[in-house]
Image (cartoon, rainbow, N blue to C red):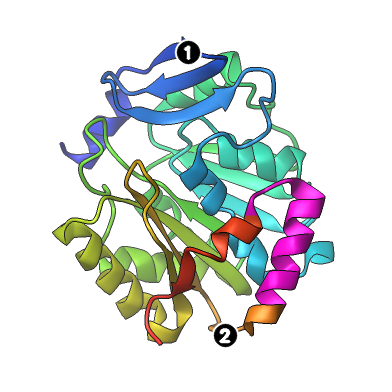
């Protein structure tokens, strides 16, 4: 499917066991919300998209800038806005997704800390206003069939790198361990450099999250463990479990 056709895909919802799911006209889940905890992150891979917290001093998180490319059910933007107290920008090509998130998935109204931009992510991140402004960039860009990322080239990832602050990180959802996964990692490495890239083992559902740092660091295991302990204590994310399945992509 051509990227511009994503703007007109049907958006629908389903519910089961207290969880509301977002779909783009198929059975594939594009995001979810636990109805009795709407600002928590329900899906395991989406929790892992927050692994940039391992590289950020916890006391410095509030007030930083988080950007999400591909709104989905809005879980990342809602968590960053409500729990982390960050300034948030979400870029979504399909206006219906944003409408459904506001109406049914508890996405807060826009204010001085929250902005939803209806645009093609590839062109939006080239806008001069974003250069060097983003501390946490979440990239989750799949079409209705969830076969491969819609934007996945070395040039796209280079544009992503350009929007990051010096301490900034990008996290990307790569679905499946197919040839497209290896190509995606190669594209990210070519844009960020081999020492900047970290990756998780895939979840049971097949989502493999990759993290890339604007400025590569290699914290000692004890430092990451201490940071994971603090992330769990402050925000309830399963950061200790992350460290069992998270490592540099290349040593």
Residue denoted by label 2:
218
Which residue is at the front of the view, 61 or 231? 231
Residue 161 point in image, percent of width and height? 46, 70
Q: Residue at x 43, y 41 (%)?
A: 70
Circles 1 and 2 in contact, beta carbons < 8 Å = no
Q: Is residue 250 above or below residue 106?
A: below
> 10 Å neighbourhood of mark 1: few (<14), some, or many (≥20)?
few
Magenta part of the chain: 223-238
- Element at label 2: loop
- Main SS of the magenta part reads helix
Q: Quadrant of residue 5?
A: top left
**Helix, strand, or loop for circle 1?**
strand
Q: Can residue 135 be seen by looking at this rendering?
A: no
Task: Tell me which label, 1 or 2, sits earlier in the chain.
Answer: 1
Judged from this view, the residue extending furthest toward the right is 59
The residue pinned by badge 1 equals 16
Q: Residue at x 28, y 53 (%)?
A: 151
């Amino acid at each position: 499917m051509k990227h511009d056709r994503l703007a007109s895909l049907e958006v629908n919802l389903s519910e089961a066991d207290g969880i509301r799911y977002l779909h783009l006209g198929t059975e594939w889940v594009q995001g979810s919300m636990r109805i009795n905890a709407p600002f928590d992150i329900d899906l395991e891979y989406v929790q892992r998209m927050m692994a940039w917290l391992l590289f950020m001093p916890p006391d410095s998180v509030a007030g930083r800038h988080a950007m999400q490319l591909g709104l989905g059910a809005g879980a990342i933007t809602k968590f960053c806005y409500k729990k982390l107290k960050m300034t948030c920008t979400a870029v979504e090509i399909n206006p219906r997704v944003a409408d459904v998130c506001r109406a049914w998935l508890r996405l807060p109204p826009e204010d001085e800390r929250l902005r939803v931009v209806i645009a093609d992510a590839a062109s939006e991140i080239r806008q001069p206003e974003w250069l060097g402004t983003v501390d946490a960039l979440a990239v989750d860009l799949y079409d209705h069939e969830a076969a491969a990322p819609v934007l996945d080239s070395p040039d796209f990832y280079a544009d992503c790198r350009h929007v990051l602050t010096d301490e900034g990180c990008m996290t990307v959802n790569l679905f499946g361990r197919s040839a497209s996964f290896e190509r995606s990692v190669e594209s990210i490495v070519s844009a960020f450099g081999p020492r900047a890239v970290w990756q998780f083992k895939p979840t049971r559902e097949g989502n493999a999250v990759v993290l890339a740092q604007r400025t590569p660091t290699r914290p000692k295991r004890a430092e990451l463990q201490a940071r994971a302990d603090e992330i769990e204590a402050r925000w309830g994310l399963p950061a200790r479990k992350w460290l069992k399945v998270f490592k540099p992509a290349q040593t």
